[in-house]
Amino acid sequence: MALATPAAHAAGTTLVLDAQESYTLPTEGEGPNLGLGITASGGDAHDVSVAVDASSLAGKATMVVTGDCVSTGALKVRCDVGPLSGGESIDPFFLKPTAAAEAGDTGAITYTATASDAPTVTGRTDVLVGGPKLVSRPYPALKGIAPGAGFERTPAFANTGAAPADKGVMLLVQDSEGVSLARDHSNCHYSDQPDVGAWCRFDTPVAPGAAYETDVPLRYTAAQDTMYGYNTYVVWPVGGTAPDSFDPSDFPATGTGAALGLKPVPSGSGFTGSGYGTFATTQHADYAAIGDTVEGKVGETVSITVGVRNNGPGRMGLQWMDADNSGTFVVTPPAGTTITGAPGLGEQGDPGPRWNCTPQKAGAKSYTCDIGSTDFRPGDSVTQEFTVRIDRVVPGARGGVKAVGNPEYPNRDDDSANDTAAVAVTVTGSATSSPSPSPSVTGSGSPAGAGGTVAGGALAATGADGVVLRGGVAVLLVVGGGLVLLMVRVRWGRASLRSSPRP
């Protein structure tokens, strides 16, 4: 990166332009976004603005303005920064070649930065049409890595462009969490964050049609809980357009071993431009289903919360993979109950909880819910709240929850005993019950339904001849005129007894 230097000025705030040395414009398609940064050094600057002029490329390129910059003419833009404290990145434009552009054409992009309280500074980027085009070789997918074990990766690239990368190349290595890169090489700069990686510079010129790989592999170690991950890298010419994610200040450490070098390899169809590859260890994650109890009265709608917990020791770590979830869990409501309220995925029920299950309708026999976290760590759990209506009592009814892994990224669960959990039912009374009817007098003179029972369900007591206590029942049931009724029933009872033989 080239740092533009201001002209002589009085002590105080100065502007520093951070512009790339060169910009490669392909003969077809479009070039990368131009990288540009500006910093206020020694204090704050105000009314900062940067004018960018690529008019030397007239007839060879067209400009597509991006960011907050505005066009001020053919192949010219102005980027108003305003007050500036520290540094700021600017994303002004990218270029497209015209039909008249030919490999080997050159030009320049110039910059003029001004402020109301800092001297004007200028900068320049050289443009080459049809320059080097560096494409990477994909990493192979690796499997069967033991937890905590090491593995190796070898970056490789080819120059498929029409011009050489005569100043050498830059290599940026980035990886997923859960893997560490050995700090082996003195020409590489390493990050303190494993997922940021390292960058290395090689001064080897790379001619058109040439291909290289690193002379020794990069060495990695997987963490004990890592199950899945990736490694990736990108290569670009020294002084050319760096990836948007590249910031040299993110890599404070320098390796202490021998310099990493390049060695020639045959070029061929294996260089597709994507330096990406996945890896998988043999670590496993024990999924434990989480059940609950449907508790309430018949007719009530209550809530339960069910789901899955990761008991470890493995961490799924799929957040940067092509995975939508870490698996699913299937919920079956108990017999005699109904899941109610099924809004669209991710929507709020009315009434009801946020819904992340299918089908999206009430009353289904079962529901499949995502373990939506793709960074499912040991100790994490994913749950879903359900609203359940208790329709009727079904003795012994039980539903369930079943944890299911993602078939593309299996959790390799070695404990199936806790993959399922019960959804039980406890009915607490009846919301639809009514009081028992009061007994009534019938033509026979006995209480309705009398068969050894009275109101309240208690067994009726009897005396030696069954007379006095039967009359007593009649007295309890009839308050007014009770003596008349008692006398009738007593006489009826005695007559019956006289006409019946004693045992």
Image (cartoon, helix red, strand yellow):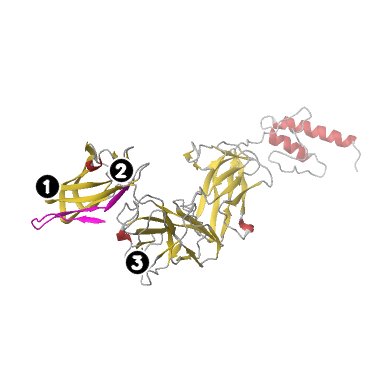
| Quarter-of-image position of residue 283 | bottom right
In this picture, residue 337 sits left or right of residue 496: left
Q: Amino acid at mark 3?
A: Asn
Closer to us: 161 or 480:
161
**Residue in view at x 12 percent, y 51 percent:** 118
Query: Of the residues under marks 2 and 3, which one precedes in the sequence?
Result: 2
Q: Which residue is mark 2?
A: 94
Query: Of the residues under marks 1 and 3, which one precedes in the sequence?
Result: 1
Q: Which residue is mark 1?
A: 116
Whether label 1 touches label 3, CB < 8 Å: no
Asked which secondary structure carries label 3, the reply is loop
| Quarter-of-image position of residue 14 | bottom left
Which quarter of the image is occupied by the N terminus?
bottom left
Residue 351 visible somewhere in the drawing = yes
- Give the CA separation, mark 2 to mark 1: 28 Å
Q: Which residue is mark 3?
A: 187
Q: Position of residue 272 (x, y in %)?
A: 46, 51
